[in-house]
Image: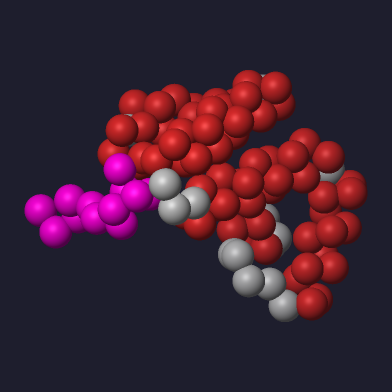
Amino acid sequence: MKNKYTFLKNNLSDKKQTELSELITLYPTLGEAYRLKVLFNGLWDIPDKKSAAAFIDHWFDEVEKNKIQPFMKFARTVKSHLKGIINFVETRITNAIL
């Protein structure tokens, strides 16, 4: 698929942004998937655990409502690592060095 990276990149040129808008219009399910991706990326701007937990709960609800299988699988993965994700949001510390 020649447009794969249009959906994966976060900073798009004007031309790619136009292509993205056209693809989202043509393929509404793909548009919903992109919206869920962008929505999840908002998690990293949240400064505290309580807000992050509420945000993730809302994101889980959106995924459940849309029933897009890859996102449902990703949501299960997020749920299994939820404590670590929430802690990272507040501390910005990971165990990656290990």
User: Percent position (x, y) of residue 69?
Assistant: 59, 26
* Residue 97 relative to residue 39: left or right: left
Quarter of the figure with residue 78: top left
Residue at the spot 42% in from the left edge and 47% down from the top edge: 48
Front residue of this view, candidates 62 and 90: 90
Q: Determine the residue positioned at 29% across, 53% down.
A: 91
- Residue 70 drawn at (x, y percent): 56, 32
Q: Please, which colouring scheme is shown?
A: secondary structure
Residue 63 seen by the camera: no
Q: Is residue 57 visible?
A: yes
Estimate the x, y position of residue 42 in percent, counting from the top left.
57, 52
As for residue 50 lying within the magenta part, the answer is no
Residue at x 66% of width, y 29% of height = 62
Q: Which residues are magenta?
A: 87-98
Q: Nearest the camera: 1 or 19?
A: 19
Residue, far left: 98
Q: Nearer the viewer, residue 68 or 98?
A: 98
